[in-house]
Amino acid sequence: MKFFVTAVNTEVGKTFVTASLLRAFLQSGRTAIALKPVQTGCEMSGGRLVAPDVSEYAKVNAYSDIAPIYAFKFPASPHYSASLEHREIKTDEILKFIDAHSAQREITLIEGAGGIFVPLNSHESFLDVMRAVDAPIVLVCKNELGAINSALCSVYVLRSHGLKIAALVLNFTDEKDEICVSNAAYLKSKLKGIPVISLRKFQKDDFAAAARSFENFIASLNFNDPSQMDAGAANLNETAAIALDAAQRGQKDANLDENSKNSDACFALDTAQVCEQDGEIKSSHVAPPLMSASNTGPIDLNFDAKHLWHPYTSATHPLKAHGVLRAEGNKIYTTQGALIDGMSSWWCAVQGYGSETLNAAATAQMKEFSHVMFGGLTHAPAVNLGKKLLSMLPQFDRIFYADSGSVAVEVALKAAICYQQNVSPKKNKILTVRGGYHGDTFGAMSVCDPVTGMHSLFSGILARQIFAPRPSCRFDAPFDPSSTDKISKIFKENKDEIAAIIIEPIVQGAGGMWFYHPKFLDRLRELCDEANAVLIFDEIATGFWRTGRVFAYEYCSAAPDIICIGKALSGGFMSFAAVLTNEKIAHGVSRNGGVLMHGPTFMANPLACAVSLKNLEILCAQDTAQKVAQIHSDLQEGLRGCRSLDGVADVRTLGAIGVVEMKEAVDVEALQEFFVKRGVWIRPFGKNIYLMPPFITPRSDTQALCEAIRDAVKLKIYKG
Ligand SMILES: *Cc1c(COP(=O)(O)O)cnc(C)c1O
């Protein structure tokens, strides 16, 4: 849906109104953009013409930082400013510009320049553009002496040209000034078909407070049937006559009201709600709570900052958190606008957000039952998901459903230890490599990298495990057999104690985004076979196509005894994970009446099972490998240019993962804010600025993500 913002004159605050209205639409959860096709009075800065109004929009929404198609230096009527630069404005080009930029948005606000008859060239004015666009008009008027006349003249002209008026905005209304108050009252009574919205004089940049004045207006719009907005076109001459009558014959109010009611349909607006806007004038400068589209209530960011713990943050000095209104496809809609997701919400949202198929799977299961205990009971979702998992992982035999990745790692470690207790009871240590990440619970933490896993914080409580160096041979380098010497030596020295080896195959994720050679894993298999240790692969991050194969360990010849899966398992829908063991482990654990002593309350949650099954069905049915390969080549192409930039240590890509490793730790907050302004969601950690977009990401968005990283590095944002 488009709106054309015009005014009764220049200098009445049209740009402020446009930016505030833009913000109000974004807050209501819509994707919105503001465009200014023609701007005079531009200034040279950094080698290009900067349009002042567009800069205002960009404060509200990064996406609206779109240069006008016609930008001129001299501040005058466009036809004249253009002539000074020996140029001519073509309305066709303006229309193409509007079409190109409004395509992907639910709401496009188009701001004119000056008023209705402002000339663009020798024979056309903005009225011609408005008629061609044929969008409802938001008419801005300064509430001062003379406002009634100028507003009614403009309304009359617009209506008589078949244009519908979505709203009249009386800007700079002073509720203590009797002229302002009587202007508003008079215009309201005469223009019953049009919502009249009074905005007081707001401080510059206080878009948030102004946006609040548009909330009722937006709530009353009929988005489901935008054609309604055009339905009254035939009545418009009549409507125009009414407007004229209204100005001429104030005494026939009752009659006017009747006629207006008939013509109201063409505005598709519930005027009862929006005509009561004067109350808003009294609101103070305090920014309103941000409203969420789904009516789940306001997002009280102050409460969040004061009382909610976020991951790995200080309770007293938290990093900024952005309020999310909704998420759909590969976009996260925050109160600041749409963000292209480069994180898949920490590896999990491979299908993007709001998948109707996944939602339907959850809803269908919810109608039956959303949960029952798994002790002594079972159900179709658990069984059917189990069948699907075994078909994808045929070398495994038993499945343990866990409620999160960390719990899955605990269960895998427990299973390995329980197995050894029945086979070689002295073995109770776990061998792993540095640079790993396996979760945040105590058992999982004990096998995380001792430095980034903060073992020093918990020394004395954490189980002491055995660490080998990080696998040194790169994934894309020829294999260096000596790269396994150290771990082989450590293994042999401790083989009587080592119950299991746990490792993230191929990609070390949260421990450093490092990709290593598959042959390293083959060597671990040999070591485990020689000494009957259990080999555990933690594929919680890598599983389900992320690395380009369905599971990362498909790059090597070895298979583990136990595999942990999670994250993308439920397609990002909810927390869920699983541990699969082979027959040998299952039998070993259960020898002599042994049992696996673990049983989460929400084990095999039916909703999680049903959604995960549907997710796997979709991923298997589509050409997921091809999609990931495309993302990979776009990441390769898009990040390649970073290699030569200052401060960059390494650039690497694998599957749908792209990493720019810096020489030093980066300023996360500065980068995050830069990225949000750019309309992308990228959250770096340590030295790594990295991408793992949802598999549904369109190519242009992958490119935009890469470009944002390139610019952030070029501009040295990472230095803070
Ligand atoms: C994320 C992750 C975990 C922990 O999963 P949670 O669901 O966050 O508990 C474990 N291992 C690896 C490799 C992970 O990436």
Image: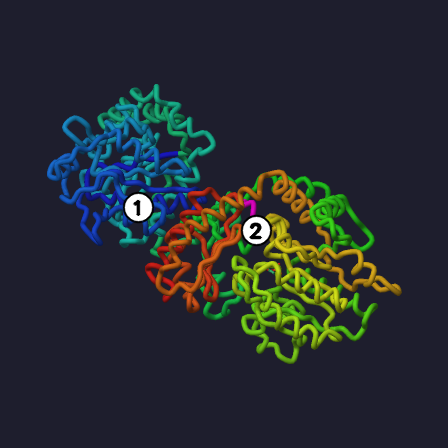
What amino acid is labelled 2 in the image? Arg
Q: Identify which residue, 4 or 375, lies in the foreground.
A: 375
What amino acid is labelled 1 in the image? Leu
Q: Residue furthest left?
A: 84
Residue 717 drawn above or below residue 377: below
What predominant SS class does the magenta segment belong to? Answer: loop
| Residue indicated by mark 1 | 199
Element type at mark 2: loop
The quadrant of the image that shows the C terminus is bottom left
What's the residue at 70%, 64% (across, down)? 526
Q: Identify which residue, 649 or 337, lies in the foreground.
A: 649
Asked whether mark 1 and ligand 1 are closer than 8 Å, the reply comes as no
What's the residue at 40%, 63% (across, down)? 648
Residue 620 drawn above or below residue 236: below
Q: Identify which residue, 658 or 460, lies in the foreground.
A: 658
Q: Which residues are magenta?
A: 348-353
| Residue indicated by mark 2 | 546
User: Residues under labels 2 and 1: Cα distance?
Assistant: 50 Å
Asked whether mark 2 and ligand 1 are closer than 8 Å, the reply comes as no
| Quarter assignment of residue 502 | bottom right
Labels 2 and 1 touching (C-beta < 8 A): no
Total numbered badges shown on the rendered structure: 2
The picture places residue 300, in percent across and down from the top left corner, at: 47, 57
Residue 350 located within the stretch drawn in magenta = yes
Left/right placement of residue 261 relative to residue 410 reads left
State the colouring used for the structure image.
Answer: rainbow
| Disc 1 residue crowd, few under 14, some 14–19, many 20+, Cα 10 Å | many
Residue 95 drawn above or below residue 462: above
Of the four image quadrants, the one with ligand 1 is bottom right
Who comes first in sequence, dot 2 or dot 1? 1
